[in-house]
Amino acid sequence: MRDWRIRPAERSDAAAIVALEAESFQSASWGAKAVADGVADRHARVIVAAPDESAPPAGFAFWRRIGDEAEILSIGVARRMRRMGCARAMLEAIMAAARADGVRALYLEVDVANAAATILYQSLGFEKIGRRKRYYRNGGDALVMRRDL
Ligand SMILES: CC(C)(COP(=O)(O)OP(=O)(O)OC[C@H]1O[C@@H](n2cnc3c(N)ncnc32)[C@H](O)[C@@H]1OP(=O)(O)O)[C@@H](O)C(=O)NCCC(=O)NCCS
């Protein structure tokens, strides 16, 4: 387990985040333009994680606050840096930032076929609260999960 450096993304991180998102989601990627627009969107909160201060980002996450709720929009970690606690560290940072902002509950959607992410979220206290049929472009259902803060 590493001690991840987590910080808000800057515009100069956009290319790295585009590459990480494409590697993470492949055919289900948002696409380079949407990812770059998301980095620039002042309503989105974007964080990156790196193993040390001089290293390029190994993970990214997008989230946004809506009143006293918040939603995780996307999270991904470079393949070669997985199972080292990066996603967990980013989610813990989001939970702490959201809580400090007065957010009461954090939501996300996850593909029912994505066991790795579902286990990760459950290990952090997210609970399954619903299912959205045919939510993804490939026809897959999404689980809706919530974590009270
Ligand atoms: C899901 C993803 C973000 C996890 O990132 P990660 O940095 O490897 O996750 P962590 O190392 O923080 O894992 C924390 C815990 O989650 C669970 N977990 C993570 N990956 C897992 C896997 N492949 N299989 C089973 N459990 C897994 C484990 O409980 C793990 O703890 P452990 O390693 O001590 O057993 C990463 O696999 C990824 O980028 N996948 C592709 C994109 C994606 O699916 N994003 C989520 C969309 S909702």
Image (cartoon, rainbow, N blue to C red):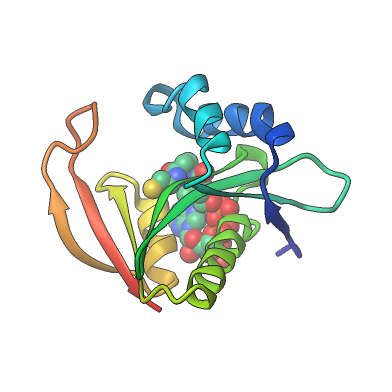
Q: Nearer the viewer, residue 110 or 36?
A: 36
* Residue 63, position as x, y percentages in the image: 46, 52
Q: Nearer the viewer, residue 104 or 18?
A: 104
The C terminus - image quarter: bottom left
Q: Nearer the viewer, residue 43 or 135?
A: 43
Instruction: Answer left or right for 128 relative to 18.
Output: left
Q: Image height check: is 112 above or below 30? A: below
Q: Residue at x 56, y 28 (%)?
A: 36
Number of marks in the rendered image: 0
* Residue 16, position as x, y percentages in the image: 68, 31
Q: Residue at x 61, y 27 (%)?
A: 19
Q: Residue at x 59, y 45 (%)?
A: 60
Instruction: Answer left or right for 136 relative to 117.
Output: left
Residue 121: which quarter of the image?
Answer: bottom left
* Residue 57, position as x, y percentages in the image: 72, 42
Q: Residue at x 14, y 53 (%)?
A: 131
